[in-house]
Amino acid sequence: MEINGLLMDLNDNVVTCVAQVPAGEKVVYRKGEEVCALTAEEEIPCCHKIALNDLARGEDVIKYGELIGRTTGPVKKGHWVSHHNIYSVPRDYESELVSV
């Protein structure tokens, strides 16, 4: 199977597709040394995200091991995760500063 998705961090709940994936085809990615696959339940455009598991409304979307947004409604496993179903969550940069 050819890799067509990237898991950026082991804690992520989305994978980024590096090619357009038609509905019904597999998104294949590495999770450490393991090669994993899931079926795209709808077309996923190139450079967009696919949900690795069912996400409830208001659930955190994690990419790069970081919070990139929250869902505006339920997103099922294998579905497209985009600006249509997530919103940005402002970060508290002050609390992230490291004192030296």
Image: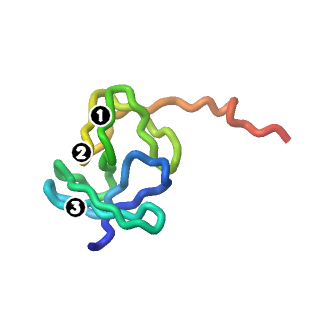
Q: Residues within 10 Å of mark 3 (few under 14, many from 20)?
A: many
Q: Secondary structure at mark 1?
A: loop
Pointer 1: what residue?
85
Secondary element at tag 3: strand
Tell me the CA gap for discs 3 and 2.
Answer: 12 Å
Q: Which mark is residue 76?
A: none
Q: What is the three-letter code of the residue carrying label 3?
A: Lys
Query: Residues under labels 2 and 1: Cα distance?
Result: 10 Å
Mark closest to the chain's N terminus, 3 or 2:
3
**Lower sequence index among marks 3 and 1:** 3
Q: Position of residue 84 (x, y in %)?
A: 27, 35
The residue where tag 2 is placed is: 79
Give the vertical position of 98 relative to 22 (above or below). above
User: In the rendering, at what x and y percent does residue 85 appear?
Assistant: 29, 34
> Which residue lies under the disc numbered 3?
26
Q: Is residue 3 left or right of residue 91?
A: left
Left-right relation of 31 to 25: right
Looking at numbered disc 2 in the image, what kind of residue is underneath it?
His
Q: Residue at x 29, y 73 (%)?
A: 2
